[in-house]
Amino acid sequence: MHWEAYHCVESIEEALQLLDEYAGASRVIAGGTDLVIQLKNHQRRVKALVSLSSIKALRYIEQDGETIRIGALSTHNELAKSDLLMEKAKALSLAARAVGSPQIRNIGTVGGNIVNAQPAADTAIALLALGAKAKIVSSTGERVEVLENLFKGIGESSVNPAKEIVTEFIFPAFFRSAFQRLALRKAFTLPIINVAVALLIDQKNICREARIAIGPVSTVPFRAKKAEAILNNEIISEKKLVLAAAEAMREINPRDSLLRGSAMYRRAMVKVLLERALRDAVVVK
Amino acid sequence: MEKLELTVNGYHYQVQVEPDETLLDMLREQLKLTGTKSGCNKGECGACTVIMNGMAVNSCLVPALQARHAEILTIEGLSKGEELHPIQEAFLASGAVQCGYCTPGMILSVKALLDNNPKPTVAEIQEGISGNLCRCTGYEQIVQAVQSLAGKKV
């Protein structure tokens, strides 16, 4: 027996009440494309699962002024199909398309991808670059966290799925963004390297804000802040983009991996992918 | 055990399931719909693919209780008795079946693809079946089978 009870709830309140009743012995399940495997393999143990999949109120992708809001139960397929994201958050749109297979994208959710906290999670890399915040509720209240603060280690997030629920991701609509990924095959495979960039460029072609996220080069999705500093408050030029990509290559510290290639190779590929992503982001809009 | 009501291939069912039973196990062991195959059991091979509420899913990853009131289509729901479904006909005509283990899942992924996109490009076909592994055909004949269905009613 992998779990003793499975509850499908229709509202957040109902979910929080159940989680409280189980007092730590239950946990939230969204799409389950990672969690079900972890439970089958006894990598995690739980007495009961509280399924959020029927909560329709947590499935939306919308623009609210200068902000984009995404319900955490939105599936990767819903993100991939969204014209709004393709136009205003291209990095996230492309990242969602890169996740898993059609079957996985049909049920796997963006909230699950974040809480599962894998350093290579495509949507995590994109949302980190886009400066996203997560809204998290529990029976004792609500908190809003910048994405950086959610990642604690490989497979470990600061969201406690025994009592908390991620309800929403919020990020600005004004970035020009892009996403690049290198993998062994074109489809259904984990990335060797994935990068996302988000740039705010003013009318004088000056970069007012640059955000660069890279995975999997650390135990958590990585922000390349030194590379960002090279672009911040500078006029955007091909030379600057190349310099920033080279800086990112120096500030990351990837491991040699039998699965993903040598550190040297992956470092070199970060530069290539980042140059492509930065060029792509500059021409967006 | 918990009560589960759902529709499979147009028939309404009421079954008793364990809380941790997967949709795949329920279909195979309780409804004896063994056309849906169990392969890797971790969402990688696609042999267990069924269509749930219009979307292809890995039934090995879906808790059966998650399918409450859902509409499920399995390979058994495609043919009408001895009369094969056009996708099945196309697979036979193109030699897209060898050992056959991937075929039910593959055909349901193709059905989900064509329902949304009746004239897919080769790239779109490849993407549509990217969650289904076939170790015999090299995929070429499968892609040809799908191409031969372009624009036809499936």
Image: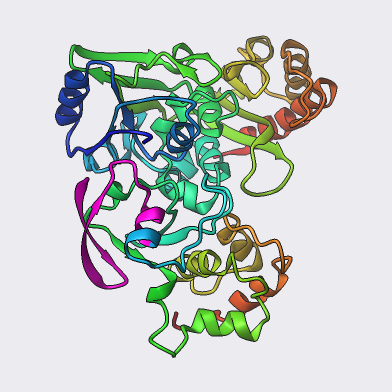
Q: Which residues are magenta?
A: B1-27
Question: Which image quadrant is residue A217 in?
Answer: top right
Asked whether, in this view, residue A130 is left or right of residue A225, the answer is left
Report whether residue A282 is seen: yes
Q: Position of residue B143 (x, y in %)?
A: 65, 71
Q: Nearer the viewer, residue B127 or A283?
A: B127
- Asked if residue A207 can be seen in this view, the reply is no
Residue A135 occupies quadrant: top left
The answer to whether residue B8 is magenta is yes
In this picture, residue A12 sits left or right of residue A161: left
Place of residue A33 in the rendered image (x, y in percent of width and height, measured from the top left):
45, 40
Residue A213 drawn at (x, y percent): 60, 22
Residue B67 in the image: state x and y as whole percent: 29, 52
User: Which residue is the extreme one toward the bottom?
Assistant: B83
| Residue appearing at x 71%, y 39% in the figure | A183
Give the colour scheme shown.
rainbow
Where B30 sits versus A28, above or below? below
- Say above or below: B50 vs B98: above
Decide which of A183, B15 is in the foreground and name it: B15
Reply above or below: A247 against A34: above
Q: Which of the 4 image quadrants contains residue A247?
A: top right
- Nearer to the camera, B109 or B37: B37
User: Quarter holding the N terminus of chain B?
Assistant: top left
Look at 59% across and 62% down and name the residue there. Answer: B124
Residue at x 36%, y 36% (from the top left corner): A1
Quadrant location of the C terminus of chain B in the rendered image: bottom left
Q: Residue at x 33, y 41 (%)?
A: B20
Magenta-colored stretch includes residue A23: no
Q: Is residue B41 left or right of residue A238?
A: left
Nearest the viewer among B132 and A26 is A26
